[in-house]
Image (cartoon, grey):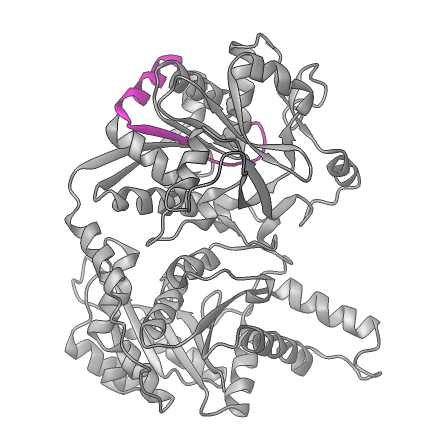
């Protein structure tokens, strides 16, 4: 029988429900159990693909092409598993399914109502994950904050599951305890109200994760226990930490894993004690010598604040690779638009060991990124271009090396005479008909690597030696609509660009490289989506290794 753990948030958003869910999963794995995880987003959007990354954060893409919330990235990184569309649901997706069922007479002529049919569809999806994954535990993170109207139906589904499986459902409330600077005391009252709001939905929290700037002391634990109707041992301290990879070890100091198992009347199936994970946490703490990486993007400025969540997987991938070398990552955000206005400012790139231009859409900041790429090419600064970063590297090379002075992408100029980057014919139809959601080249695609290239070397490390002439295939996740135009491929190669990876089915360029450069690689896919803390992505590893010598 699968057990279900619902994770809900109190007081405010951004308290760490996703990382908490991933952490609980990691701890249960260390006790010998198989785990899967689901994220429920209370948005009307059918998926995360049409959401603004500045507002919502990064759009994470799964192997099957599902565009989802960045929390699924944390689940995959912590649990070292690949998830699918079954592991992600939104209000829009649930309603869409129920309406389609009604149109197909699958409700047998009944009046279809918000309750119970919407919660029943949610429960059906949760049970589907349990059955397909054959997991001992399924973790369900309900997005938003307790007390909001948007997630009431998901809480209703959770309540109904508790009623049906009383011994197999546990609720975890992740709530924030502020420490106002003018008072200097940790306050429990907001968490008390969050617990009562959850009670009003018919749910009593079994465990409260007390998020705060500092560790929660015994007096505060006692107060939460009394007013929130839990035992003191069920209040888990979750202070701010320098690295999210410390959280599983931190939670185990309060015996979260054993506390959860007791709720289900279960015992561990052998203790693995997270040996590798503890070694990683120790590397992170003891690393001193920095590697300085600059990320030139455009989705991190929101008013006077920096929103690094837009590039969360890129950041984590850099960290994974740097820690692998027992070094300390120093990541700086660089504005592409600044280089468009002030060309002299671009000289600051020399102070970095490596530069990354990540993915993105639209032409804002692209000329600044092209100037960045030209500077990296000429000054031998290790460069790694991801998706748009690969396309812009191709445009820069076409303009400044091949002499195609008007080279650009049809995404930026539909009438350009030199469309180095162009949209596929089938994509043109979709754009014309305004079918945007879920219609890009999404998910895992095969790539054949060219021998004697940087990429071939990076992916080959740790694998069995390949016989001469035997191709090396990899699989990587995509999220884009525009491709390198094959009409210009020969001209680019004549001037020294190396086509290091090709999608064999569609003959599309996946990887470009430059010779006589320490590391200049652009990839059409998103390698950051497959990096794991214990297993850094091969291309990030190679990029950071070269940058570390810079």
**Total residue callouts:** 0
**Height in image: 19 above or below 307?**
below
Q: In the orientation shown, which residue stands out farthest toward the front?
A: 467
Kindly tell me whether residue 119 is visible in this rendering.
Answer: yes
Q: Is residue 35 left or right of residue 504?
A: left
- Determine the image quadrant of residue 19: bottom left
* Any part of residue 307 in sight: no
Who's the residue at 29% across and 80% down the image?
A: 270
Q: Nearer the viewer, residue 323 or 181?
A: 323
* Outermost residue to the top: 403
Q: Position of residue 127 (x, y in %)?
A: 58, 79
Q: Write the residue at 24% across / 55% down.
A: 280
Q: Position of residue 75 (x, y in %)?
A: 43, 62
Residue 506, position in %: x, y?
A: 69, 37
Dividing the image into 4 quarters, which one contains the C terminus? top left
In the rendered view, tell whether residue 50 sits above or below residue 173.
above
Is 410 in front, or is 400? 400
**Residue 236 placed where, x, y %?**
26, 75
Q: Is residue 189 above or below residue 299?
A: below
| Magenta stretch bounds | 342-363
Q: What residue do we see at 36% from left, 51% from top? A: 535
Q: In the figure, residue 517 lies in which quadrant? A: top left
Q: Quadrant of residue 488?
A: top right
Is residue 40 part of the magenta span, yes or no? Answer: no
């Amino acid at each position: 029988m699968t057990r279900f753990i619902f994770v809900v948030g109190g007081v405010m958003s951004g308290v760490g429900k996703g990382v908490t869910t991933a952490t609980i999963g990691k701890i249960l794995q260390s006790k010998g159990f198989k785990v899967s995880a689901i994220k429920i987003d209370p948005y009307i959007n059918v998926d995360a693909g049409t959401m603004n990354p500045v507002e919502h954060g990064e759009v994470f893409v799964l192997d099957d092409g599902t565009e989802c919330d960045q929390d699924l990235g944390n689940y995959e990184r912590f649990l070292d598993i690949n998830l699918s569309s079954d592991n992600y649901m939104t209000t829009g997706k649930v309603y869409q399914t129920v309406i389609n069922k009604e149109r197909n007479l699958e409700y047998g002529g009944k009046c279809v109502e918000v309750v119970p049919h919407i919660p029943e569809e949610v429960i059906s999806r949760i049970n589907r994950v349990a059955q397909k994954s054959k997991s001992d535990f399924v973790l369900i993170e309900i997005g938003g904050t307790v007390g909001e109207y948007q997630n009431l139906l998901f809480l209703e589904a959770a309540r109904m599951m508790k009623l049906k499986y009383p011994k197999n459902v546990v609720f975890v409330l992740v709530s924030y305890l502020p420490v106002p600077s003018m008072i200097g005391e940790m306050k429990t009252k907001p968490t008390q109200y969050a617990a009562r709001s959850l009670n009003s939905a018919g749910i009593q929290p079994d465990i409260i994760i007390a998020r705060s700037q500092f560790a929660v002391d015994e007096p505060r634990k006692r107060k939460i226990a009394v007013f929130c109707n839990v035992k003191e041992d069920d209040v888990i301290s979750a202070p701010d930490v320098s690295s999210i990879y410390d959280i599983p070890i931190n939670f185990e100091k309060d015996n979260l894993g054993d506390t959860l198992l007791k709720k289900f009347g279960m015992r561990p199936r052998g203790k693995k004690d997270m040996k590798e994970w503890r070694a990683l946490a120790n590397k992170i703490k003891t690393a001193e010598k920095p590697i300085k990486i600059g990320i030139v993007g455009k989705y991190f400025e929101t008013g006077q604040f920096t929103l690094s969540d837009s590039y969360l997987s890129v950041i984590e991938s850099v960290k994974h690779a740097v820690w692998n070398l027992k070094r300390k990552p120093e990541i700086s955000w660089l504005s592409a638009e600044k280089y468009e206005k002030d060309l002299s400012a671009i000289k600051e790139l020399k102070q970095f060991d490596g530069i990354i231009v990540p993915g993105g859409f639209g032409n804002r900041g692209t000329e600044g990124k092209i100037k960045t790429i030209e500077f990296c090419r000429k000054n031998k600064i290790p460069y790694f271009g991801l998706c748009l970063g690969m396309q812009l590297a191709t445009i820069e090379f076409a303009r400044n090396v091949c002499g195609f002075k008007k080279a650009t992408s049809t995404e930026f100029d539909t009438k350009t005479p030199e469309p180095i980057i162009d949209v596929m014919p089938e994509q043109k139809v979709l754009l014309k008909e305004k079918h945007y959601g879920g219609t890009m080249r999404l998910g895992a695609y095969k790539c054949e690597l060219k021998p004697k290239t940087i990429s071939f070397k990076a992916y080959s490390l740790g694998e069995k030696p390949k016989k001469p002439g035997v191709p090396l295939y990899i699989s990587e996740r995509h999220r884009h609509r525009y491709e390198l135009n094959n009409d210009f491929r020969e001209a680019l190669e004549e001037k020294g660009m190396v086509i290091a990876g090709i999608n064999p089915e569609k003959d599309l360029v996946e990887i470009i490289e430059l010779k006589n450069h320490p590391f200049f690689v652009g990839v059409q896919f998103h390698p950051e989506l497959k990096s794991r803390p214990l297993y850094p992505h091969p291309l990030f590893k190679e990029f950071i290794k070269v940058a570390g010598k810079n």
